[in-house]
Amino acid sequence: MLSNKPMNILFFGPSGSGKGTQAEILAEKYNLQRLQSGAILRKWAMEKTAFGKKVQAAMNEGFVPSEWIFQMTEEEFNKVDKNQGLMLENFSRMLPEIKNLYKVLAKLERKLDYIFLIHISDKEAIKRMLKRGTCEKCEKVVVLEDEVQEIICPACTGIIKRRKDENIESIKKRLADYHSKTSEVLDYVKAHDRLIKIDGNQSIEKVFQDIISYIEINK
């Protein structure tokens, strides 16, 4: 990657891997525009337009057509200054999504410079998810003390609380779905780019340093 080009990074990793935390601090360090597929969908669903209402209805039914996602993704990416890099999260949970992402980036003459897979064991993922809370407004994730059920979000003043679906049974199902759906996505990525595996079982600081070291060496 040429140093004068905007840097574009994509993260993979199961729930609890810490990819959101790493994306947040890396975006700040390198002045990257952080984009999340879920946030884009919610933004469009709140629009008081005919399309926005269709998106909201589709989200309520649990399925948004891929061509709609392509349209929304392209428009949101177009709003980013061409000289600013991108930090991308959750655009690639299934094969159609990663194919869509590559199409959008190609159309905008961007490419993925670093694709990181933060790997953690299922045991560690379950342990982490049972302790975390999520902001109902901005979806910031924090670790809650055992006796604490909710706190005020430091980022947006929303309410951070434990999700009702974060129990052992539902977490195991989500991890199983992740492994099942992501395997073909990772195969697709490996056929087009280099996938960089990072040990997510380490501390936040050590994971961050491993990522930074890789980027700095390969600039």
Image: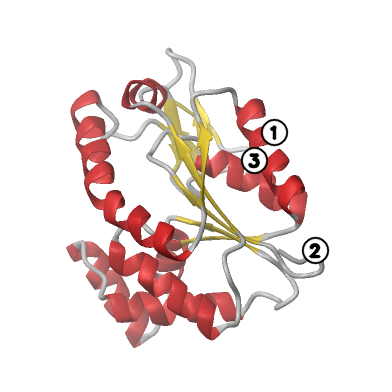
Query: Neighbour class for label 3 at 10 Å: few (<14), some, many (≥20)?
Result: some
Q: Is residue 92 left or right of residue 104?
A: left
Mark 3 is on which residue type?
Ile
Q: CA distance from mark 2 to mark 1?
A: 19 Å
Disc 2 is placed on an element classified as: loop
The residue at which mark 2 appears reads as 3
The residue at which mark 1 appears reads as 209
From this view, report whether residue 32 is shown above or below residue 101.
Answer: above
Furthest residue toward top: 147
Disc 3 is placed on an element classified as: helix
Q: Quadrant of residue 15?
A: top left
Mark 1 is on which residue type?
Gln
Q: Position of residue 6 (x, y in %)?
A: 72, 68
Q: Position of residue 45 (x, y in %)?
A: 37, 71
Identity of the residue drawn at 42% across and 24% down: 128
Q: Are marks 3 and 1 in contact (CB under 8 Å)?
A: yes
Disc 1 is placed on an element classified as: helix
The residue at which mark 3 appears reads as 211
From this view, report whether residue 21 is shown above or below residue 35.
Answer: above
